Image (cartoon, rainbow, N blue to C red):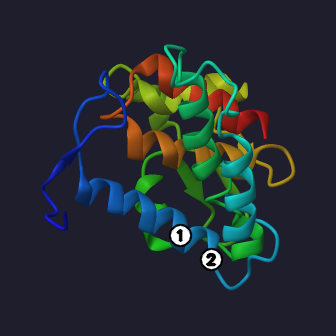
Amino acid sequence: DTDADTEITATTAAPPVSDRLVEEWSVLIYDSMSAPSRSFHCLDHLWDITCSTAPAPSSSAGAGGDDTIDDIQTIAAYFHDVVYYTIDGGLSPDQSSKLTGIITIDPTDATAMSLSPDIAYYSALDPYPAMVCDVFGFDPASGMKLDPFHGMNEFLSATIAIRCLQSTLSFRHLVAMTACIEAT
């Protein structure tokens, strides 16, 4: 069905998600992973990772078992490398829009990025960015500089995933997905 407003559901417990929203996520992931600068963290890598997270045929998943862990790992795999800041030469407009209020980029040095103090200030209204900081061990109030060799790309990728999925997945599942991305 090509109707953009058709509702689909990943599992019976998940809230309905429009085809349009799934397409937006897919385009963001595809555009990120197919950037001309990508040689390893590209679509082939994504395919290899997502195929390896699928449950084995002998698994109890799908036969009365709990598919949730496999599903969360697969979703995390889709998003885990959407940001590769130094390789891609910055953020795409779509990535930037998802990270508004989360990071501050130094206008004199585009490679210098730090956490926005807005994360801690607005955490009562929007707990998701602070949760990502907690999982990564970052202090959201610190304004700390993000290091591309110490979790920056994974943090930004997890934050984008949260921004995409926060109205779809439970907080518990978002924490699990963030932990999966942090572990990469």
Give x and y (percent) for residue 119: 48, 34
* Quarter residue 181 falls in: top right
Q: Secondary structure at mark 2?
A: loop
Say which amino acid is labelled 2: Ser
Count neighbours of disc 2 (C-alpha within 10 A) and say few if under 14, some if 14 to 19, many if 20 or more: some
| Label 2 close to label 1 by CB (< 8 Å) | yes
Kindly identify which residue carries mark 2.
34
User: Can residue 140 be seen from the camera position used here?
Assistant: no
What residue type is disc 1 on? Tyr
Query: Residue 154 at what x, y percent from top left?
Result: 70, 46
As drawn, the label of residue 30 is 1
Per the image, label 1 sits on a secondary structure element best described as helix
The reply, left or right, for residue 21 in relation to residue 86 is: left
Up-down relation of residue 127 to residue 108 (above or below): above
Q: Residue at x 43, y 54 (%)?
A: 98
Question: What residue is at 19 percent from the left and 63 percent from the top?
Answer: 1
Q: Residue furthest bottom?
A: 36
Left or right of 10 on screen, residue 33: right
Q: Position of residue 69 (x, y in %)?
A: 59, 24
Q: Residue at x 45, y 37 (%)?
A: 118
